[in-house]
Amino acid sequence: MAIVELKNINKDYYLGTTVVHALKNINLTIEKGSFSAIVGPSGSGKTTLLNIIGCIDKSNSGSVQIHGNQIDSLTDNQLTELRLFNIGFIFQSFHLIPVLNVLENIEFPLLLMNKYSKKEIRMKALDMMEAVQITDQKNHRPPELSGGQRQRVAIARALVTNPEIVLADEPTANLDSETGSVILTLMKNLNKTRKTTFLFSTHDPEILKYADSSITIRDGQIDAN
């Protein structure tokens, strides 16, 4: 079953009088429960593609369907709700809140959902901390953590809402190769045990050994070769 379907997606950016064709006629299907990679060099359109799938950006033309929702027709409030309840995000720069400790960072999206009691929020956050093996650092703030520890927190925060799909934009870019391998193995294990769909971007072809399938993108176009 498809969780993401893109049809004839085009995205242009305007830099003064210059038009940048970021994505050109993209057709893509991501299956539920898959662990897939978008691979390509810097500037190829990987992040733009993830942002459109994550409802952070909008295409200029084409059709986008996420978890059965035709997002082109959704209001801003409906898009916000879709992101909060169905999509998890992991960024290469972590995007953790520096004044909150590990536990509070993981709890934060659950608070935004306005759906659970304080006790339920705490239990869900503690469960995810254990899953990503960051429990010992629960009272530490992000500046006190290593890069690998911060990414574990980011993964826990992305998964704590039990999203249908997690989008990871270059999740190992700011990590050394050994730590990056540990993080990808962790993500792969969570994909298997929790059946969460993962779609991540990378410019490093070595990372492809972790993916079930891959999509190569060059100059805004999917490479069929």
Image: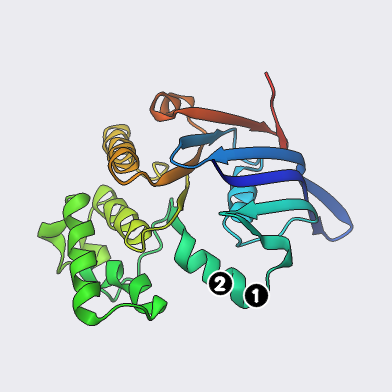
The numbered dot on residue 76 is 1
Question: The residue under label 2 is which amino acid type?
Answer: Thr
Distance in Å between CA atoms under marks 2 and 1: 6 Å
At horizontal 27% and vertical 52% (from top left) the residue drawn is: 152
Up-down relation of residue 206 to residue 141 (above or below):
above
Q: Position of residue 148 (x, y in %)?
A: 27, 47
Q: Secondary structure at mark 1?
A: helix
Left or right side of 107 for 112 = right
Q: Position of residue 71 (x, y in %)?
A: 67, 61
- Residue found at the very far front of the displayed protein: 1
Decide which of 136, 3 is in the foreground and name it.
3
At horizontal 43% and vertical 50% (from top left) the residue drawn is: 92
Query: Coloring scheme of the render?
Result: rainbow
Q: Position of residue 95 (x, y in %)?
A: 41, 63
Number of marks in the rendered image: 2
Up-down relation of residue 151 to residue 172 (above or below):
below
Left or right side of 202 for 216 = right
Left or right side of 89 for 116 = left
Question: The residue under label 1 is which amino acid type?
Answer: Asp
Marks 2/1 in contact by CB < 8 Å: the verdict is: yes
Q: Which residue is mark 2?
A: 80
At horizontal 35% and vertical 41% (from top left) the residue drawn is: 191
Name the quarter where the C terminus is drawn: top right
Q: Count neighbours of disc 1 (C-alpha within 10 A) and say few if under 14, some if 14 to 19, many if 20 or more.
A: few
